[in-house]
Amino acid sequence: MNEPQIAFLILYAAYIAVILIFHNTLLCYPFRLLTTFLHEISHAIACWITCGDVHTIRVFDNEGGVTEYVGGCRVLIIPAGYVGSAMWGSLFVMLSGGRKTSTGVAGVLVGMLLMSLCYAPNRTMICLNLFYAVFTSVFIYLEWWVFTPILNYVVLFYGAFVGIHAIFDTYQDTIRRTVLRSDAYACYEQKCNCCLPKCVGMQWAIIDIILQLFGVWVALVQMSEECGNKEWLECLRGDLAWDSPWEMNGGQIQEWGNQAKDMFN
């Protein structure tokens, strides 16, 4: 393990400790609202992907939210909230290590914050989105024209907080208690009558944890010495590659064909 990987793990562990200590305090309230926004925008993205139409996206000051839509595939839209916010957390973590990657994902976040204002937002969401759009844009500017690295730390904190809060939120809303209007209950009523809402929530929580760990693993892979001179996707593709026992080249196939032909001659 090299120095960047050690520094990343230490900083990530420090972020997790701070998040766990101050999670339910006023200090982390804006970040909890950000996670709520990512929860709702994930519903909206799933709706768009499945050819639905989103009417409103709203975030409330009680840390709740609602996405009103018509059409689309509800089986995919319903779980997209909790699982989707965890995916965003994982994405922030895995892309936090590089200057270009952290800038790219920060830019995507700013774009989503501004684009979602076109869908009948309430006052809380307008204030939230404008604040984080400006806040994140300032760090993008500082990263490229004032001081580097700085955006990496912000994106990593986003990822750590969103990922941990997604796990905590899934536990509170779907496992610890059963809320009739929760996503887990809606999923149970929609297609999963054989699986109780708490079982649905348990599956989502496991997925949330796996996604956060996957984000950390990818970030560490990108910081390894083997990836020092490679592009981001090239490095990840190389790390995920393995020799399959079922792979065969053209020469082998031709040789086997000739052998089979000789057997029948």
Image (cartoon, grey):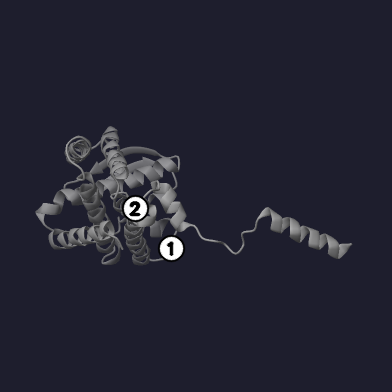
Residue depicted at x 68% and y 53% = 250
**x, y (%) of residue 158?**
23, 50
Mark 2–mark 1 CB contact (< 8 Å): no
Query: Is residue 64 among the parts visible in the rendering?
Result: no
Q: Which residue is tagged 1?
A: 193
Q: Amino acid at mark 2?
A: Met
Q: Can you tell which quarter of the image residue 177 is in?
A: bottom left
Rendered position, 104 above or below 90: above
Q: Can you tell which quarter of the image residue 135 is in?
A: top left
- Secondary element at tag 2: helix
Which residue is the extreme one toward the left? 26
Q: Which residue is tagged 2?
A: 87
Label 2 crowd (10 A; few <14 / some 14-19 / many >=20): many
**x, y (%) of residue 199?**
37, 67
- Secondary element at tag 1: loop
**x, y (%) of residue 98?**
30, 47
Q: Amino acid at mark 1?
A: Asn
Which of 83/192 is in front? 83
Q: Can you tell which quarter of the image residue 185 is in?
A: bottom left
Residue depicted at x 11% and y 57% = 25
Query: Is residue 261 among the parts visible in the rendering?
Result: yes
Q: CA distance from mark 2 to mark 1?
A: 26 Å
Quarter of the image that includes the N terminus: bottom left
